[in-house]
Amino acid sequence: MRKIQVQGVHHITLMGADRQGSIDFWEGVLGMPFIFDQPNLDDPDEGHLYFDPGDGRLITIFTNETRKGNRNRTPTDAGCVHHLAFNVSKATLSQTVERLEARGIGHSGIKDRGFMDSIYFKDPLGLLIELACYRFEPPMGCSHADVMITAHKIRVAAGDYNIQQTHLADAIEQLVEQRQQSLSTNRSAQDPYA
């Protein structure tokens, strides 16, 4: 038996209600360009809208003008989607509370997650949306996942409950030492002021 190796999210498709409401939320609130529009090829009564969440991947929405939205929280039973999280810059996250409140959208306020800050709110159909901003930049040639797994190992070895910025900083230092050569024979921390 062999794995089927995936290489990233291709797209996520959500059940929407009306076409314009979908465009107004995904592009008009979240700024995702509306890039493609065609019928749902498996159901001629539905439209299929495509949005770019900022990384060239796709969020797609099945729409139907007869389907009505429900603003109640979507189910969180086993097998259901709990929330969708999208990456934003620190500058954007710092403006999110003000911009949600200008639309009358309730939200969680900014949450400290140790390795990131985030805010939660519901879309017009009750799906929980998270906007998240990493607190670190991975070293050149590394991904956020490389930093996260290294920081996780550091955190577990230290016996700490959850990830903190010190784990991230130590992980970044460790990854740079592993990936970047140096002419120095001693790469340990030094105090040239002593």
Image (tube, rainbow, N blue to C red):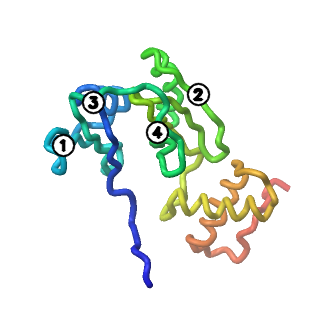
The vertical placement of 190 against 108, above or below, is below
Residue on which the image places disc 1? 36
Q: CA distance from mark 2 to mark 4?
A: 16 Å
Q: Are marks 2 and 3 in contact (CB under 8 Å)?
A: no
Residue 67, disc: 3
**How many marks do you count on the picture?**
4
Q: Are marks 1 and 4 in contact (CB under 8 Å)?
A: no
Residue 108, disc: 2
Residue on which the image places disc 4? 88
Q: Are marks 4 and 3 in contact (CB under 8 Å)?
A: no
Residue 14 at x, y percent in the picture: 34, 42
10 sits left or right of 168 in the view: left
Type of the residue with mark 4: Val
Q: Residue at x 33, y 33 (%)?
A: 26
The vertical placement of 89 against 18, above or below, is below
Query: Reading the chain from its start, which is encountered first: label 3 or label 1?
Result: 1
Query: Observer-nearest residue: 89 or 158?
Result: 158
Type of the residue with mark 1: Phe
Type of the residue with mark 3: Arg
Nearer to us: label 2 or label 3: 3
Residue 133 at x, y percent in the picture: 53, 41
The vertical placement of 2 against 27, above or below, is below
Q: Residue at x 50, y 19 (%)?
A: 98
Q: CA distance from mark 1 to mark 2?
A: 32 Å
Q: Residues within 10 Å of mark 4 (few under 14, many from 20)?
A: some
Residue 162 at x, y percent in the picture: 73, 50
Nearer to us: label 4 or label 3: 3
Q: Residue at x 77, y 52 (%)?
A: 161
What element does badge 2 sit on? loop
Q: Residue 36, located in which quarter of the rendered image?
A: top left
Q: Residue at x 78, y 62 (%)?
A: 190
